[in-house]
Image (cartoon, grey):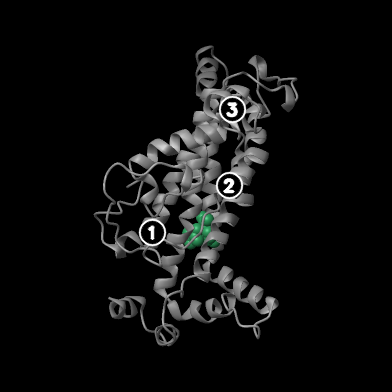
Amino acid sequence: MPHTLNLTSSPAASLLSLSHIRSVLQRLEDTIVFQLIERAQFKLNRCMYLPGAFPELTKKEGWEGSWTEWFLKESESAHAKVRRWEAPDEYPFTPVELLPSPILPAVEYPPLLWPSNNNHGINVNSKIYSFYVENIVPAICSRHKVEGGAEDAESDDESDDGQYGSAAVRDVEILSALSRRIHFGMFVSESKFRSAPSDFVPHIITASSTSPSVTAEQKTVARDKLLALITKPAVEAALLVRLAEKAQVYGGDFDAAFQARNSGMAREQQEKEREKRRKIEVDEVVQLYKGFVIPLTKTVEVDYLEKRLEGLSESQVRALADGKSWEDVAQELK
Ligand SMILES: O=C(O)C(=O)C[C@]1(C(=O)O)C=C[C@@H](O)C=C1
């Protein structure tokens, strides 16, 4: 099962099949759970997220932002040189004007998103960053269990282990996986739109209207209709069950359980040992998806749909509303 969309060698139709897109989202669950576990081994290190907390950064690098933002910029600069941000499924946190140009000429991607020049202007990375700093890191790093299962007595503010480099490496990994996962909503939307354009078109027209005769309330209703069209409760429910299982298994301490087994403890006690030194709480991971990742993916899906008819003529929009397929309309655009 491919981890990434192989955007340059597969035909657009197979790249945009929902089952293919969902398989990529499932693999990203693994990445996200593993990276959260990696970050949770370090303490909160609040200073990493405070602008100006490292005077050395300002002095040596002229950087006024936070440690983690600086490290994001450094990592994303290297990735810019190898064309990462040209891919339609990759979005940097650093403002593009601070990133260098790619070394090699641009890659040719098949037209997957609309408009095909990738200029849909959707980037929710600042929301992802704020939520990560304010909610995710404090949640996963607040409970540092020590030998014997007791919890650290330190408050969050005192929670600092000085591992600013290692923790920042994990921050960058998690942020980038979350960003990719959430922006994938655009591919989901494109796929759903192509499978039944006429269901979406009337609501897109209202939601994106600039006419004074369309009220704010009508626009909100139209957005809600789009939200209802893209929402699949059964898929969300299955995802949360699967995710809980992954967090349960990957986050347990198997070494503790192994040692308990070797010292002849009963099975129940072995399981207790595994849970006592759990690396991440199952509920935290489930809540992260339920309260943040899925809702923001859905916002991206609806934002994308709202712009989906931009650049099309009135007659093309009418043809889609009347049931013509996107492939037929796109053929005329060539
Ligand atoms: O798989 C889909 O159909 C999606 O739209 C993705 C997703 C998700 O974020 O996982 C979002 C909305 C749906 O209700 C189900 C799942």
Name the residue that disc number 3 marks. 58
Name the residue that disc number 2 marks. 128
Quadrant the C terminus occupies:
bottom left
Q: Residue at x 44, y 68 (%)?
A: 192
Amino acid tagged 2: Ile
For marks 3 and 2, the one nearer the N-term is 3
Determine whether the residue tagged by mark 3 lies in a helix, strand or loop. helix
Q: CA distance from mark 3 to mark 2?
A: 25 Å
Amino acid tagged 3: Thr
Determine whether the residue tagged by mark 1 lies in a helix, strand or loop. helix
Determine whether the residue tagged by mark 2 lies in a helix, strand or loop. helix
Front of the two marks 1 and 2: 2
Indicate if the residue with disc 2 has its beta carbon within 8 Å of ligand 1.
no
Name the residue that disc number 1 marks. 19
Residue 258, position in %: x, y?
50, 19
What label sits on residue 120 in the rendered view?
none
Q: CA distance from mark 1 to mark 2?
A: 26 Å
Q: CA distance from mark 3 to mark 1?
A: 47 Å
Residue 304, position in %: x, y?
50, 65
Please tell me how crowded label 2 is: few (under 14), some (14-19), or many (20+) other residues with Cα within 10 Å: many
For marks 3 and 1, the one nearer the N-term is 1
Please tell me how crowded label 3 is: few (under 14), some (14-19), or many (20+) other residues with Cα within 10 Å: some
As rendered, which of 63 and 26 lies closer to the eye? 63
List the single residue furthest toward the top: 263
Tell me whether circle 3 and circle 2 mark residues in contact (CB < 8 Å). Answer: no
User: Is residue 41 in view?
Assistant: no
Amino acid tagged 1: Ser
Tell me whether circle 1 and circle 2 mark residues in contact (CB < 8 Å). Answer: no
For marks 1 and 2, the one nearer the N-term is 1
Query: Does residue 228 sit above or below 144 in this rendering?
Result: below
